[in-house]
Amino acid sequence: MARPRVLLTGFGPFPGAAENSSAWLVEELAGDRQSSQLGCDLHAEVLPTEWAEVARLGPGLVQQHRPRLTLHLGLHKRAQGFRIERAAHNLIDLREDARGAVLDRRTILDHSDRRLDTAIPASQLARHLRARGLPAVASRSAGTYLCNYLYYLSLHWARGQNGAYDVCFVHLPPGPSQGGPLSEAELLRGAELIMRYLLAFALDRDGAETSGGEIGPGMRVAEPMTR
């Protein structure tokens, strides 16, 4: 069986956040040992927190790699754990990016839906993490900054494809060096659990579509291997 293609992204620094925990986490997960344990073909990118670059790289990466799963990670400075985002909104915040640029419009895509929802069961994923001792919540909004911008573009691309292409966005708290509530080991363990959950979800969904059945709630998800 072919290994599923997975696109994993994080962000670099932005105004008010000189360090971004998502960038570190993406680099850790993309390491040879970590990615080989996940059982997927992983392509990882740390994106500059810039409107123009996200507009270019976001659609370009999914079109190039056509990932079965896309997991976007980003920093939420007030998060106390993992925030699983249910949806992206067709809104743009007039905030400066890492280069000081501000967009001159308020919508991401003209003549498109006000909101796009992920097929990933965000509440179930949050419960899955909490059951393993990690703080997690399902969130109704990814905001209106670049995290939401990228999420909306990826969900829009996935909706236009034939077949299943699942997209998930998870906001992370600051890292421990910035006073965040989780250790590096907890952040890495949580990210591994999320990745394995998403892979299991995709496997169940693909099997259900092949057999004509429904996705069941009892997905078996392997625990991350200890380092």
Image (spheres, rainbow, N blue to C red):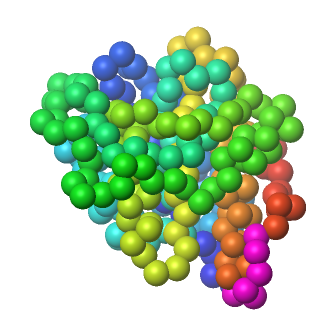
Q: Where residue 117 sits in the image (x, y, percent)?
A: 51, 53
Q: Image point 36% across, 55% down: which residue?
A: 113
Against 128, is 208 above or below? Answer: below
Q: Is residue 25 left or right of residue 14?
A: right
- Give the quarter of the image for residue 153: bottom left
Q: Image point 71% across, 44% down: which residue?
A: 123
Q: Where residue 102 sits in the image (x, y, percent)?
A: 17, 30
Against 179, is 108 above or below? Answer: below
Quadrant in which the N terminus appears: bottom right
- Give the quarter of the image for residue 68: bottom right
- Magenta-drawn stretch, dominant element (helix, strand or loop): loop
Q: Image point 57% across, 31% down: which residue?
A: 172
Quadrant in which the C terminus appears: top right
Q: Which residues are magenta?
A: 210-215
Q: Image point 22% across, 38% down: which residue?
A: 106
Q: Nearer the viewer, residue 1 or 115?
A: 115
Please say whether residue 193 is one of the residues in the magenta stretch. Answer: no
Q: Is residue 161 left or right of residue 179?
A: left
Q: Nearer the viewer, residue 188 or 162?
A: 162
- Give the quarter of the image for residue 184: top right
Q: Where residue 174 sits in the image (x, y, percent)?
A: 55, 22
Q: Looking at the image, can residue 34 be seen?
A: yes
Q: Where residue 121 sits in the image (x, y, percent)?
A: 68, 53
Please say whether residue 211 is one of the residues in the magenta stretch. Answer: yes
Against 51, is 95 above or below? Answer: above
Of all residues shown, which one is farthest toward the bottom? 211
Q: Is residue 48 left or right of residue 198?
A: left
